[in-house]
Image: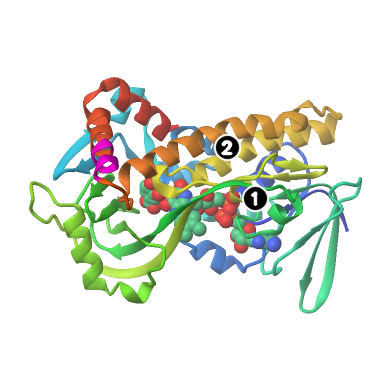
Amino acid sequence: ERVQVAILGAGPAGLLLSHLLHLAGVRSVVVEARDQEYVQARVRAGVVEHGAAEILREAGVGDGLDREGLPHDGIELRFDGEGHRIPMADLTGRHITVYGQQKVVRDLTERRLADGGDVRFACGPAQVHDVDGPEPSVTYEVGGVGQRIVADFVVGCDGAHGAGRVALGAAPVEKEYPFAWLGILAHAAPRITELVYANHERGFALYSMRSNEVSRLYLQVPASDRLEDWPDDRIWEELAVRFSLGGEPWEPTRGEIFERSLAPLHSYVGEPMQRGRLFLAGDAAHIVPPTGAKGMNLAIRDVSLLAPALAAQLRDGEESGLRTYSERALRDVWRAEYFSWWMTTMLHRFEGDAFDRRVQTAQLRSVVTSQAHSTALAEAYVG
Ligand code: FAD
Ligand code: DHB
């Protein structure tokens, strides 16, 4: 079997890439390891930045976002028992939209299938071959029968543990953080109207939402903790302490916790994002810690650069777009790595000395009192 572009992974990157290629008249196949239910049930990011929302709208897949997404004009930074609002819309003229990654994936999947797109779920982990030659290929197995797709180009949108990253074979530039995020979803009306990022002695906490009925909350926990260490009551009590206002515990509205997960924090960039006829996009190429809410947005941004470059090469033989893809994408990637690292180091509790802790608080004070400093945060956050 032969196709113009073989795409690994049906996350935001792979699905949007195949949709954008379709709009440009290029045929692709998406090969996804897991089944459709699993992919659509996977809970992850929640913030769509301005630029990513524009890309989705321009591609004609922004209706769900505009209908069900919650526009937010600001965020709160809470530390030393006080809340400080960063008025992002006033500072930048742009806003973010709280809209779950699950819904982005649902919208894209529905649109691909409605357009007759070739999205193959439940293929198991696919493999990539011969990326340095003229005929790269992807193989996978269904029901014990081997399948092989030969393509002009292979794109790895298969996340941090996929085959794309392995085939790239580059030594990554990376950084580990000594903690993880415990994330929950609860059937509880959020007590807030804007996200709260809290820096507390006992660690970072984040109050977010998915709708007016569903709250999304995160706690910084040691990387070695397990979900069993965190029964429901302990989670709610710890959240109340970390969101304290004026020395008093401040508890989020409680509700049934119906999803929970642990995610370690790290930064990772594989450079360049290309090798021969293999290109990488999204988490396959780079990971950011979630504090800046950039992961999904970067994935969307990558494929908005890659799709026109692939189309220009395949339709017109114009290769400059592909030649410069990695360089152009990495500029934004490193800006996001920088912002995510900054947010992470400013907001989390590190095993440090008193000096580091004081500097952290001074930095937060500067961000909330200097308009220049808060504008810098707002610009990076809204994208
Ligand atoms: P993915 O969404 O990971 O999609 C990759 C797809 O490839 C998956 O469907 C996978 O099953 C498939 N696959 C893997 N290997 C293979 C293979 N060999 N063959 C075929 N298919 C394969 N970002 C934020 O901005 N905010 C957050 O709060 C946030 N929370 C997160 C929580 C967790 C637990 C994780 C893991 C990530 C989180 N992220 C968050 C990051 C964000 O979700 C990712 O940046 C985003 O999913 C990237 O999209 P993607 O399409 O590149 O990769
Ligand atoms: C969410 C996740 C983030 O990492 C973040 O910075 C903000 C919101 C969320 O899941 O809602």
Q: Earlier in the sequence, mark 1 or mark 2?
A: 1
Q: Which residue position is annotated with label 2?
A: 301
Q: CA distance from mark 1 to mark 2?
A: 12 Å
Q: Which residue is mark 1?
A: 14
- Whether the magenta-drawn stretch holds residue 20 is answered as no
Tell me the element at label 2. helix
How far across and how far down the image is residue 51, in percent? 49, 32
Q: Which amino acid type corresponds to the residue marked 2 in the rendered image? A: Arg
| Residue depicted at 11% across the width and 56% down the height | 249
Residue depicted at x 37% and y 32%: 95
In the figure, is residue 130 to the left or right of 303?
A: right
> Residue drawn at (30%, 27%), measured in percent from left and top?
374
How packed mark 1 is, by other alpha carbons closer than 10 Å (few <14, some 14-19, many 20 or more), is many
The answer to whether residue 279 is visible is: yes
Q: Which mark is residue 206?
A: none
Write the start and end of the magenta stretch as one range.
Answer: 354-359
Quick one: quadrant of the C terminus? top left
Instruction: Indicate yes or no: mark 1 CB to ligand 1 under 8 Å.
Output: yes
